[in-house]
Amino acid sequence: MKRKFPLYGAVLAGMLYLAPTTASAEDISKHWAYHEMNYLITNDLMKGDEFGNYRPNDAVTRSEFAAFLVRTLNLPASSSQATFSDVKKGDWYYGVIEQASYHGLIKGDEQGKFNPNAHINRQEMAAMLKRALNYQNINTSSSPINFSDNARIAKWAYADVQAVVTSGLLVGKPNNQFAPLAQTTRAEAATVLYRLIHLEAPETGGKQYTTTNYSYDYSSVVKKQAANNPKVDGAGIFTASDALVSYYVHPKSVMQDSPSFYQFLKLSTVVNNLSAKELNEKVLANKGSLAGMADAFIQAGVDNNVNAIYLLSHALHETANGASALIKGIEVGLDLSGKPVMVTPENRDSLTEIKKTYNTYGIGAIDADANKYGAERAYTNGWFTVQDAIIGGAQFVKDQYISKGQDTLYKMRWNPENPTIHQYATHVMWAVIQAKKIYDIYELIGAHTTTNLVFDIPAYQGQSSAPSLPNASKQYALDPYIAGATGKATTNLNMRTYPNTADAASIMTNLPKDTSFKVLGENGGWFKINVDGQEGWVFDDYVHLENGLQIVNMNIMLNVRSEPSTTAAILGTVKPNGFIIGAVDDNGEFVKNGAWYQVIYNGKTGWVHGDYIVK
């Protein structure tokens, strides 16, 4: 379709003049831009002066051209303030500069000035036009340009000039010149605006579906992902089974256009016409530290060319709807070496430069200690207000994921281009949970009717039909390194079909105190056991292992060595907080060699260092 712009008869001071009683239009009747200017005049976009002249050859200022774009695009009012040092309240252009800046159409110079009364040149106009195209979600290609004065185009403007020339908004001057520093006239501004109004653009409120084929075999992807410590739960406690990973990796496990399908929504596009007031009232109300922060999310989206609804969803998920410690603020200070360290009662007096930090998107908040590592990362990045965390964190996500091609939730979680490498989360449902939030927000504010939604669905080689969601008892992986250990209940103990105390229906039976059993494996601090041929799960706090050793909770896997030496061959690894069978002597004591414990690993004898064993 042709893009339809609302046309306004509002007066743009210095550019759109008051109409005389009778407009003669004598000065444009034979002008080369008559058709374009007449179109704007007919539609009340351009007015003449008191003498009926439209002055097509007058130069246009930067503020006038910004005003032209604001009124033509019908930009929503902004609740921020213009931040340029030379734009003051009371100036006729203050309001339009405020709107143009808020919606990303204009930028200032290195001194923080906008230079509103300077005449706009062609390369400056090209930059504003490219941002206007971005705002309208009009994708442009950039073919090579071959003007004789290419070298005179500023580096900062070159890509924008390429884009608007390729799109046909700007053309060259005589002698094959672009003339980047030439002033723009009212006739030229009107012509460019006419082209912008009539530029081809995609339908709004529609949906577009694309498929990207990847070279990896589906079964190999599932195998790699299942070996990458995926989690059943958001807290990162329980390791997911192969069957659960298979379900969430498979692109066809969700129905098209369902809430979960929004995990394939491309996020590298600004959502236009968002109302901060509506988002605050309908989405962020009663959301703790995120309440009232819609302006920051919108600005973060505009600044980074990222979907602001996604940013909202991501923040709500990672902060438990604004209630997490990371978004409420955690104090961090510098130790003697200048390293950021989370403040505790024990270390407070030894730290300097203590500040409260905020982390909106869970950046750096690894499972081992999300609050500590997330807060320390926030200190390093300078996120000392909620707004800092929203805008700065959005730039991180954009730079580290979206701009690198991981521009859907699915790609951020599973990275089909390079599975298991550079993935944002460990929870298997991370993408689906956020997709549902994004869907709900779109529906709540009606953005799905005004925005063109593009979905990018991955496809793997040898991709089978979609698997069914496994039942709860099949969703948990089994760590076998403790298999064969003997355990005993230290109290009356419930045995469950899967490791979750919140579900009473999962209780299979009650084991009396001192019941002995064989351990089949472990997951998240629970043992899967066999009692008289019946298999189930028990919580390890109420189990005494006669020959089990627990690994300390650390950030790396523990190496199992062939001999009691750090130079010996590595037989394999054991995950932090996991278990391994210790070799015992005839007296039931663990076999040791100095600080090393002898262990049974995959049926072989090995050794682990005692510093990494829970005492």
Image (cartoon, grey):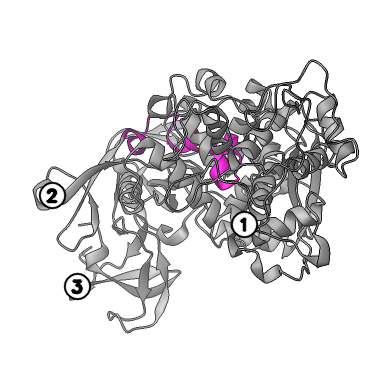
Label 3 crowd (10 A; few <14 / some 14-19 / many >=20)? few
Q: Mark 3 points at which residue?
A: 595
Residue at the spot 61% in from the left edge and 28% down from the top edge: 274
Please say whether residue 303 is one of the residues in the magenta stretch: yes
Contact (CB < 8 A) between labels 3 and 2? no
Find residue 192 and report its horizontal and vertical position in percent. 78, 43
Residue to which mark 1 is pinned: 415
- The mark closer to the camera, 3 or 1, is 1
* Label annotation for residue 347: 2
Task: Please tell me which residue is depicted at 82% across the width and 51% down the height of the picture.
Answer: 168
Quadrant where the N terminus lies?
top right
Residue 213 figure quarter: bottom right
> Is the C-beta separation of discs 2 and 1 under 8 Å?
no
Magenta segment, which residues?
Answer: 301-328
**In front: mark 3 or mark 2?**
2
Three-letter amino acid code at disc 2? Asn
**Residue 339 percent coordinates (x, y):** 23, 59
Residue flagged by tag 3: what amino acid is it? Answer: Ala
Residue 530 can be seen in this image: no
